[in-house]
Amino acid sequence: MSTISPQTIRIPQEFLPADGRFGCGPSKVRPEQLSAFGTRGAQLLGTSHRQAPIKNLVGSVRSGLSELFNLPDGWEIVMGNGGSTVFWDVATFGLIQERSEHLVFGEFSSKFGEAAAAAPHLGQPVIVSTEPGTHPVATKEDVDVYAFTHNETSTGVAMKLQRPAFANDALVVVDATSAAGGLPWSPSEVDVYYFAPQKCFAADGGLWLAACSPRALERINSIAASKRWCPASLDLKIALDNSVANQTYNTPALGTLILLDEQISWMLKNGGLSWCAARSQKSADHLYSWAAERSWAEPFVRNAAERSAVVGTIDLTGVEASDINAALRANGVVDTDSYRKLGRNQLRVGMFPAIDPEDVVQLTRSIDFVVEQLIP
Ligand SMILES: *Cc1c(COP(=O)(O)O)cnc(C)c1O
């Protein structure tokens, strides 16, 4: 056991990343986004969201996302306040007709299922779950929504998005909060792809965004026409009608929109989603192969095909993750802690597109240095 206090370890400059933020949300905001915030923000903050300058900003976010995801004609980007957690309630009212199936493989994927189970107007959902570190596959059931999670942020498992062959009229609704902008997907496999801006989009929290297929829009309209009760702030039809007018139902955080718009432009300028995905994959390839080469570390996700390129989880033996994290934090390298409820001796590393793959290399050099001090 180590006798040295982790906080006293000084990592040499040559091993430190240029930017020490590796959190999985809120995650690293690029300095260029912040300078743009200073210039664009100075013009836009404190002005009405019902006037052209902010409507244009919302329009730019919506068209930028459509381009980034290569959305076919007829899709819409819908948005509202409250983040992905609120979208689970929105979907419970506005997307699930009667009954849903949920693939549950961690903390985040369990929450939408819980929301659907608690809704008095819906039938009991089908929950298909597997152990953390793996993911389940959909089963054929009489349901009208299949709820998937592209990237389970609590465990670092990513699933390939594929519409089940037996889905019929059911919608494929995907929590892509930590995946959107960093993992590839095809609109033909999905009806609703929802997320929040504080992960791959390197912005601030508080907003939900949902790319909706024509089939999803039809469902939203038909549930609205059925006059089933829904609180206005959670009403997807109201959100849709506002979004197509480049508006939100109530006042959005303008700063979040500016940071988000800057990140979307940066992604598009560099080559779009395939460039972003390749950049995250480069970070991930390094992290997982580094871990595999260490006697005291190994990737938590056994199946290499399910290892996330945006959230890396590394199990440790013989050295405490909490000691490593304390030493890193004392040196300005932060938020490498595992998901609190997972309860493993583990490091978790955000590898979103904003994070320079070279900084992931430097992070592993820093960890090597810290471990040498802790277990000499
Ligand atoms: C972060 C996260 C959420 C929660 O997002 P909020 O905007 O904080 O509500 C939901 N699902 C996944 C997969 C996440 O990573």
Image (tube, grey):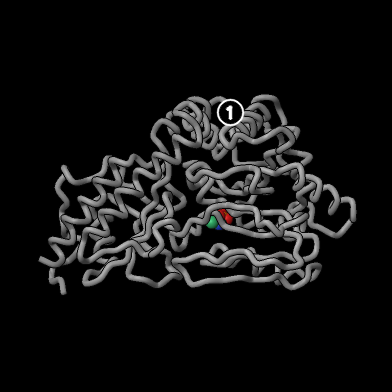
Which of the image's four quarters has the N terminus? bottom left
User: Residue 318: horizontal and vertical position, in percent?
Assistant: 21, 72
Q: Could you tell me which residue is drawn at 73 percent across and 60 percent down?
A: 92
Q: Which residue is mark 1?
A: 44
User: Residue 177: horizontal and vertical position, in percent?
Assistant: 55, 51
In which quadrant of the rendered view does residue 296 lie? bottom left
User: Residue 160: horizontal and vertical position, in percent?
Assistant: 53, 53
Q: Residue furthest right?
A: 226
Q: Could you tell me which residue is drawn at 55 percent across and 33 percent down?
A: 261
Callout 1: few (<14), some (14-19), or many (20+) C-alpha neighbours within 10 Å? Answer: some
Q: Is residue 209 above or below residue 163?
A: above
Numbered label tally: 1
Q: Is residue 250 above or below residue 289?
A: above
Quadrant location of ligand 1?
A: bottom right
Note whether residue 46 is visible. no
Q: Could you tell me which residue is drawn at 39 percent across and 45 percent down?
A: 281
- Left or right for 165, reference 367: right
The answer to which of 167 and 314 lies nearer the viewer is 167
User: Residue 305: horizontal and vertical position, in percent?
Assistant: 43, 56
In which quadrant of the rendered view does residue 323 lie? bottom left
Note whether residue 362 is visible. yes
- Left or right for 143, reference 296: right
